[in-house]
Image (tube, grey):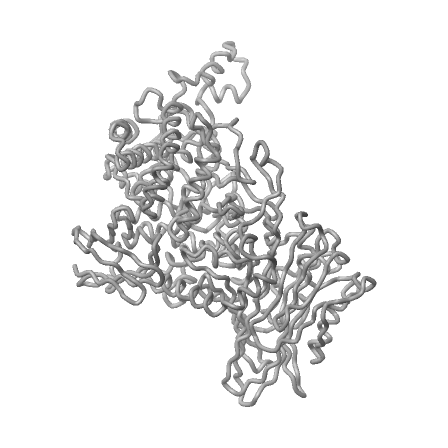
Amino acid sequence: MTPDHTTHSSTNWPLKYRGDKLLQIGMPMGGIGTGCICLNGYGGLQDFAIYGKPAVTATHDYHNSGNAAFAVLHIKGENGVTRLVEGPFPPEKIYDQGLQALGYCKGGHEGMPRFTECEFTSEYPFGTVSLTDPSIPLQVAIVGWSPFIPLDDKNSGIPSAILDYSFTNTSGTAVEFEFSYHVSHLARGKGRETGSRNSLIPGRGVFFSNVDESTEPTFGSFALATAASDPTLKGMWFRGHWFDSISAIWRETSTGSFYANDGALSEKGLEGRNGGSLMVSRTLQPGETVKIPIVVTWYFPNSDLHVGGVGANKDSIWHPYYTTLWTDAQDAANYVIDHLDELRARTQAFQTALYASTLPHSVVDAVATNLAIIKSPTVLRESGGSLWCWEGCQAMAGSCHGSCTHVWNYAQAIPHLFPALERTLRELEYCDSMDERGHVNFRSAIPIGPTTHDFHAASDGQLGGILKLYREWQIAGDNEWLTRMYPMAKSSLDYCIETWDPEHRGGLFEPHHNTYDIEFWGPDGMCTTIYLGALAAIAEMAGALGRSDEAAFYTDLAAKSATFLDSELFNGEYYEHKVQWDGLRDTSFAEMLAGFPTDGSIDQMSALLKAEGPKYQYGIGCISDGVIGAWMSDIYGVATPLDSGNVKSHLAAIFEHNFKTDLFDHACLQRPGFAIGHEAGLLLCSWPRGGKPTLPFVYSDEVWTGIEYQVASHLIEAGLVDEGLKVVEAVRSRYEGHVRNPFNEYECGNYYARAMASYALVGALSGFRYSAVSKALRFGPKVEANPFVTFFSAASGFGTIEMDAEGLTITMVEGDLSVDTLVLNRIGSETTISVGGTARVGTPLRIAS
């Protein structure tokens, strides 16, 4: 059975979600490293993850209980009508509402009358909710967004969410209405309601703060503001008990009697639920439209999150980067409103360039929606400017700390869209997480500083770091940075060689930890292809720095590695795993076997180990990650001597054996929720030749979107375009809104970093790769289109490239791109063209072929 692609067809582009497909939608809005608030499919806000930790759907923690943010529309006149500006309440959530104690743990506004019809349009970083109702003479659209501008980490890092409400008069007469927005106090502090304080932002909105000490983790502020003129401001809600505050709001808004106050009440009046509101009155003539932007901002400057550190940094308070740019939530709100038109225009220009692509719609969807991970609580940023990331987010806590090197191997979006931020991860890896031996702790510490070194190094993560250093050098073209980083990278690679390939045979023989949270015993295709790529990459970097002897050593070992892979691990169809425990430096497993009783009186587990060897191996299985090192080398531009025909054969085998169009008969005894039943997906591993271990490597029967995108983009790179696109379509057919959130491809937690492997699809299908070192551009579309158009981003600027029969045109949206040489690959032929030109904003660069 093939997956249902109807939600991704060419007749439904951009993607529109209706009915039950709205249920799971939650689109993160916020800044890089600031946390976020999500726009849901019905036009409401949820998941207030603004306090330095995740708060994902159905969170009932200290901060989020009682949170509310909602809009009300009142049509004035003799037959006045009032609606909560959201779509119909989803029936699937009715039972959950009944479980909320007294309704207070939710917003309390959910039972207000709503619009009857709702549709969500996905065009990330914008999400549009369209609302209609037969009793309302206005069409309403809510455009939720936050600034997303490649290369501009400041404006892409504002702690804010923006909702542009547009109202269009569809009747034949003038319509007078009142639009109001209401927010409960989201910076209540330790004192809850009695410790919260409210004041006005003159002419713009309400500022919420608390009386906690400025060094407390609970200290902070929140702001509600509008860019619309002449708002009426309610600095504080009616302070009563039970449902009094929301009841008072409904009475005021539904009767057209909204009244203002300055938010200043006596101490005696501070009990009861707190919040603030603003209201805008307008009259629209027939056919007329008005836009009312709503801006919410937050500011929580003190984080007591600490994990993985040692010494002085282990327990200290640290501060998010955005607190170095703004002084409080009011300052941030004023900044957004003062620059709103520019921020919207620049974000729209990026979005237009991305969606102007002629790439298949499923690919653009996969790339765009996973950019939301960058704005999710998965990504944090410390005051010094460095990123620090989880792997993903559980409901109320981060999942798997420390910018985990082997998980972030897969993520390709930040290196291209925000390359300066990605470089901080390399610095974190080598400057803070590596010891004098060259051992890298694959989980960095927060607050940023030294880590422990009492666990295995991660072979795929540590070796992948060498390749990523090469990638960052090529993207930025910063030779001084490479000169500083190279000695540390060399120390890291030398540690890997000594630890896993001490005899310099070209494979990882000693037990080596990896992304599956176990150790592979003996050489395998997955980790050894990364080893080969790392050797080739550091050889090129050494050569560029004039270290010829070092370059020669690593080049020689890379040749041995390629020979070993092709002659010893390639079985004629794919690269496999030669499980080995004898003859190694690590004798622990062999000694354990030698210590087993010989009279047959051993337990079941011991008998299994004796018969099959170490647990959690893959042996002669076909693993989807089996040539991941070749993928990284290909997309970063690292030349290796590995047989490309064998790599392509392995990729074809992955598609043949691991891709399932229907998983109904597949047994997954691990975490089946990633793909199950009649859904399609790519298994992590299969055993087409038999020999599946009784206890294969952990997660082997699961489906991970990050692996699917890694394989899909590599299939396309290798010319297996249709196969790659089928994998992409399968992923996005699962994230269709009703069962799963289209903006949240989860794995070990929500907004999982590995899913940003989807960005590699842009380069795979367009053939785009740019070296700022040599100013060489490679380009060669893998799909037919005339013209072919794609988005691109480099360290110096971003824009689009359009290719037709006569050549190509580089058009910059922001920045510039200097090209000395173009390597143009038309299907079946490659041409090198001397260019010596620069594309600039307003001055496209045309290169004839």
Q: Is residue 366 left or right of residue 270?
A: left
Q: How many numbered callouts? A: 0
Picture residue at 49% right of the left edge, 46% below the top? 387
Instruction: Identify whether 163 is placed above or below 555.
Output: below
Q: Position of residue 106 (x, y in %)?
A: 68, 59
Judged from this view, the residue extending furthest toward the bottom is 173
Q: Which of 319 and 669 lies nearest the eye of the viewer?
A: 319
Q: Splitting the image into 4 quarters, where does residue 798 fall? A: bottom left
Q: Nearer the viewer, residue 600 or 55?
A: 55
Q: In the orientation shown, which residue stands out farthest toward the top?
A: 599
375 or 141: nearer the eye?
375
Quarter in which the C terminus is drawn: bottom left
Coordinates of residue 66 in the picture (x, y in percent): 70, 58
Residue at figure coordinates x 73%, y 51% from the top left: 190
Q: Residue at x 38, y 24 (%)?
A: 500
* Residue 735 in sight in this render: yes
Q: Residue furthest right?
A: 268
Residue at figure coordinates x 39%, y 17% from the top left: 582
Q: Quadrant of residue 509?
A: top left
| 109 sits to left or right of 428 | right
Q: Is residue 207 left or right of residue 480?
A: right
836 to 708, vertically: above or below = below
**Percent x, y for residue 631?**
32, 42
Whether residue 616 appears in this view of the structure is no
Q: Residue 248 lies in what quarter of the image?
A: bottom right
